Structure formats: C-alpha cells, structure tokens
Image (cartoon, helix red, strand yellow):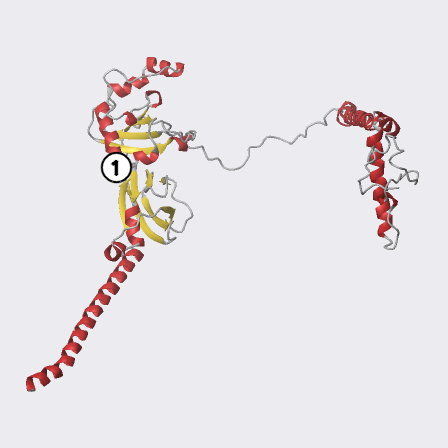
Amino acid sequence: MWSRSSSCDQAPLRLALSIKGRNKMAGSRSWVFFLTVCAVTLCEANAESKVTIPVGRFFTYELLRETFQNDFEPLSKLYSGYLYDDPMIFKCNRQNYPDLPEWLRFTQRHPYDNGFLYGTPTSPGKSVIEIYAINKRSYEATRLILVIKATAEKMLPFQAEFFLKLREIEKVLPSSVQDEIKQDVQNMWDAEALEIVNVTSALDRGGRVPLPLPGHFEGVYVKVGSEQYFSHCLLSVKTTEHQKQCREGDTVKAPKGCEFCSIPANCITWCQTQLFDLTKRKPVPPPPTVGSGILEDGGDFSPPESPPSRDFFPDYIVTVIVPLVLAIVLCLLLAYIMFGRREGVAKRNARTNQIQLYHHHTIHGNADELRNMAGDRGAPPPLSTRSMFNSRTGDRASPLQSDSPSIPLIMAQHDPYCDTLPRK
C-alpha cells in the first residue's frame, strides 16, 4: 500500500518535470530562430562588397540570382526543404545618382539570367554602386552595396581590338569564356602576359539589333593589351593586300599560320581587327597664346554704304499673285463640279423607275402624316393605314379593278379567303 501510494504521489512531479523540459527545449528553439533571423537581417542590412581594379583593366561583376534568392528566402530550405527559383530583375545606379558612372554598364537578358556589371575605369577614384534585386514572384526587394576602387596603373602600350561576330555580350562576360578568348589570343600574339582591356557590344557602337532567330548574334568587340609588341599574324592586318581585300568586300580568312580559333564562336573577323600602339602618341598641340585682351588700334570706324535699291514687284507676284490665281482657279473648278454637272431633280425623276419613285414619295408622305398626328392624340387614324387608299388622290380603289403599276404594294389578284381585302 505504501509503495503504491508513493508512486501515485510522484506521478504529478514527473509530469511537471517533463513539461518543464519540453518548454525549455521549445524556448531554446525559439531563441535559435530569433537569433538566426536577427543575423540574417543584420547581414542583409549591411551587405557590402569591395572590389579593387587597376585603371585600364576590364572589370566584371556577376550578380548571381542564387545569392539574392537566399536573402529573400533564408530559412525556406532549412524548414520547408524547398528552395525557390524565382525570376528577379536588378536595378543598378551610383549612390545618390540616378545612373551608373560613364565607364560602367549593366546588362541582363532575362529575369531568369544573372546580371553583369562590366566596364573599364579610365581614371582612379572610388565609386559606390547600389544594386537592388526585385523578386518578381513575391515583389520583395533587397539591396547590395558594391564599392569599386580604381587604382592608378600604367596603361598597356600595345593593344589590339577584335570583333567576334558569333557572340553576344552576356556570353562573353563570364570569366570562363574570357579565359578561352585570352588563350586563343595568346597563341596568336605569341605572348603569355595578356590582359583584356575592354569588352563592348556592337549595339553600343551603332550596330543593328539582330533578328530573334537562331544563328543571329549582335557581335562583341574585345580589346586585349600586352607589354609585348605585335606578332607577325597581327601585323599582317596592316599590309596593303589585306586592306585591299577588305575594301573589295571579299571574304578574308585568317593569315597562314594564324588560325588559333579553338571554338567557332570565338573566331574573329579579320577585316575589323585594329591595332593600337600607345607608344607612338601624337604630340599635344601647343596651347593658344594668351593676349592682353585689348584690341589693336585699327583706325576710325567707317560704316558700310547703303545697299542698292531693289525691285520687289517680281517677289510680290511670285508670293501673292500666283497663289491667289491658283486659289481662284481651284474654286471655279470646284464650283463647276458641284453645280455645273448636277443632273437636277426633274431629270433624275425621269430616269427613275415609277414604282421606286412612288415608293419613295409614299414613305415621305407617311412620315409627314405621322409628324402631324403626334401633336393631337385624338386625331382619326391615318388614311395611309386604311386598305386600298391612294395617298395622292385620297380615293379608294378596289384591288380587282386596279392594274396600274403606280401602286406596287396592292395585290394584283383577288383571293376570296384573304382577310386583308374587303369582301362583298
């Protein structure tokens, strides 16, 4: 009895301890969730990236959709086990300015594609770029601060620009594609130290928008620089024979021994290849000589003589009389067309069929009679509603004795079983 009663007394205590333990575990989970949300919020609020790029070097920054997707749904995969792949668009501008710097561009082909910031800084300085990512599914927005610091560095003296006809700007900006292009140029230039100086879409240089069909591309200009002088393959572009072929419009192939195109999309157009030697710069013109600001003494002022008299009557005829005569001729011609060639009512009625003319006059007469009746509700029924009534004479006519073609709506034969005709 004692052991049983003691176990019954300890049961509420065990229940209370278990509930307390569960509450403690739930509380710890709530705190973990709260701290996680706070950390994500702080990271999102203070999201900032810093990049350093030398002046005269090509800069590319890829905006990955997966990174911003984690900002929109930070705990979706942890709790629900499902990670969204939402379409999103990016808006980029310089901080406190509506647009990007002059040397920086942004491109994104489709909301399901990544965005790219690209360009070549021309002067040292610091640019703070605000990047807004907008989720097209939930219409949420997040912000990223990108700090670009351009440092001064010596420009590469020898540069070459190539045109890739079968490329688009979004397909060239990834680093892997740039490495492939650089490797082909290294083999053609016979130099290892190469740097991509600039990448520009042909649309930014006045090119036409391609048709939205397979096999049509906008084209991309790629400029590469090096410390080493041009190879014989590149120098062949400046030969007279090569330039003559390009002017004649012939299909110019790569020079012999210069075919280093590993991927067909990376093959260059030789007629649009240009070489730049920055060591041979043109001398800067001397500044203008600054004078004293006082005009030299040129003697007394002699005003010009009066111009000779001019006869303005021919000008008056050309500007006033000729247009007036043309207007009068046009008015006379229009008056002749409107009034001189009218056939008249009598002539028109003579050419019109009698049945059609009678029907026309009957409609007008009935309309006038209905207008007159509208003013007096106690008027007798109109005569035109009576059977066998002639609106012109006011007489009644039997359908059996009427063979005149002037009454087309009266039956020509008598039907003894017709209720609409009077019976004797």
Residue at the image point whose x is 77% and y is 22% from the top: 314
Q: Which residue is mark 1?
A: 175
Quick one: quadrant of the N terminus? bottom left
Seen in the image, is 147 located left or right of residue 290?
left
Vertical comparison of 266 with 22: above or below: above
- Indicate the quadrant containing the C terminus: top left, top right, bottom left or bottom right: top right
State the image coordinates of residue 316 (x, y, percent, origin top left): 77, 26
Residue 100 is at least partly visible in this image: yes
Asked whether, in this view, residue 201 is left or right of residue 354, the answer is left
User: Which quadrant of the figure has residue 376?
Assistant: bottom right
Q: Residues within 10 Å of mark 1 (few under 14, many from 20)?
A: few
Q: Nearer the viewer, residue 267 or 2?
A: 2
Asked which quadrant contains residue 405, the reply is: top right
Where is residue 220 drawn, in percent x and y?
34, 30
Q: Is residue 209 above or below residue 32?
A: above
Residue type indicated by callout 1: Ser
Decide: is 183 above or below 40. Answer: above
Number of marks in the image? Answer: 1
Q: Residue at x 20, y 26 (%)?
A: 191
Q: Secondary structure at mark 1?
A: helix
Say if residue 226 shows up in the picture.
no
Near-viewer residue (291 or 97): 97
Along the viewing direction, whichever of 346 and 254 lies nearer the viewer = 346
Residue 347, how many percent across, how many down? 87, 26
Image location (x, y in percent) of residue 411: 82, 35
